[in-house]
Amino acid sequence: MDTVSDRSLSGRPRCTTQRQDTNLVRNHVENRFLSASASSCQTRGRNNQRISANTARRCLSTSGLRARRPYIGLILAQRHRHQRTLWAQDYAAWDRIQWRSVEFTDESRFCIDHADGRVRVWRRSGERYQADCVREHDRWGGASLMMWGAISYNDRIGPVFSIIHVEGR
């Protein structure tokens, strides 16, 4: 009589072993910006066959890694984070009357001469600001547009001016 353990498994057999899955995940944790299609070309499955990009994505997804757009910004040193925390603590007790006398300003630079492309980073939930998941942007170089503005309790100014900044042309 057939028992459950005697019956063959239904469905297609896995094309990768557990060890190959572990290596694939390790490669993506070490190089977060590696694409699934690039890693599928480097990884061989059972019987030395190539695995598909979908197999690589499925393996990474099973391990909790998801392809997300990276946070693009400056990587702050521990000293900078500490200084920002101290600044926030100094002004945490201010009331509305004190904040009315403050003017907030900001400037932004927009790159004109190149597109950033569709870059993805493989990360787990809660790892968005982890240093190896952040794509640092180049602050200077190339054509750009600078804009500046200010806001306070009584007024709003901006954008005050815009400058086309061209280097190396």
Image: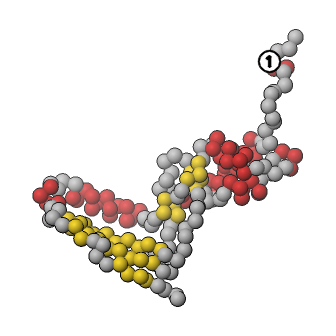
**Residue 40 position within the rendered picture, expressed as x and y whole percent measured from the top left:** 74, 53
Q: Position of residue 139 (x, y in %)?
A: 46, 74
> Hey, which residue is sitting farthest top in the picture?
1
Q: In the figure, residue 104 lies in which quadrant?
A: bottom left
The extreme left residue here reads 97
Residue 123 versus residue 142: which sits nearer the camera? Answer: 142
Asked whether residue 131 appears in the rendered view, the answer is no
Q: Position of residue 95 (x, y in %)?
A: 15, 54
Reply above or below: 109 against 6.
below
- Amino acid type, label 1: Val
Q: For this view, does 163 lie left or right of residue 18?
A: left
Residue name at image x 52 percent, y 77 percent: 113
In the picture shown, does residue 76 fall above or below 146? above
The residue beneath circle 1 is 4
Q: Is residue 95 visible?
A: yes
Location of the N terminus (image quadrant): top right
